[in-house]
Image (spheres, rainbow, N blue to C red):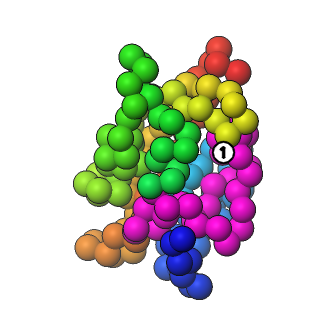
Amino acid sequence: MTEIPTQYNLVLILARRFAARLATAVFLVDANGTAIYYNEAAEHVLGRRFIQGHGMPSEEWSTVFHPRDEQGNPVPLEDLPIGVAIHRREPAHGIVTIHGADGVDRRIEITSFPLFAHTDDFIGAIAIFWQLNGDH
């Protein structure tokens, strides 16, 4: 299991506070790709509640929801928008279909970008996403 740091960079703390107040789904990861927070709106889309203090490593979250492209092919972590933000440290946007933990398939549109505390100080990434209309 991935060890959870006891203290995060201020930028991650502020990003989490920001996400907690949004009605839009937000997923936040640290520099290692470990999911450190997702908000209530994300819980509804993912079909899974966020468990405080339980960091979900990228190897888990990138596969547990079975992300697929428009043709139904699996999308590897490095090709997911948040994977691009983590690995290439670039913003990215895309559409994938996920299989929620509640057993429901959902098409979601995702915009992700890396988070930096300073110019060369990569500290994590954030994904803002929403379920596409007609896929309720």
Image-based side of 89 in relation to 136, left or right = left
Quick check: can you spot residue 52?
A: yes
Q: Provide the residue designation for mark 1.
A: 42
Q: Is residue 47 or residue 29 the one in the foreground?
A: 47
Give the total number of marks visible in the rendering: 1
Residue 47: in magenta span: yes
Residue at the image point whose x is 35% and y is 57% from the top: 86
Work out which quarter of the rendered image holds the C terminus and state it: top right
Residue at the image point whose x is 40% and y is 68% from the top: 31
In this rendering, is residue 65 above or below 29?
above
Image-based side of 121 in relation to 70, left or right = left
Work out which quarter of the rendered image holds the N terminus and state it: bottom right
Single out the residue that lies furthest toward the bottom: 6
Q: Is residue 122 or residue 102 the one in the foreground?
A: 102
Q: Position of residue 97 (x, y in %)?
A: 51, 27
Residue at the image point whose x is 56% and y is 52% from the top: 27
Q: Position of residue 106 (x, y in %)?
A: 60, 26
Q: Secondary structure at mark 1?
A: helix
Q: Is residue 84 or residue 100 the one in the foreground?
A: 100
In this rendering, is residue 92 above or below 88?
above
Amino acid type, residue under disc 1 in the picture: Ala
Residue numbers of the magenta segment: 30-58
Q: Is residue 135 or residue 91 the one in the foreground?
A: 135
Q: Position of residue 98 (x, y in %)?
A: 55, 32
Q: Quadrant of residue 76?
A: top left
In this rendering, is residue 20 above or below 24?
below
Q: Residues within 10 Å of mark 1 (few under 14, many from 20)?
A: many
Quick check: can you spot residue 91?
A: no
Residue at the image point whose x is 69% and y is 31% from the top: 103
Residue 130: in magenta span: no
In this rendering, is residue 134 above or below 2?
above
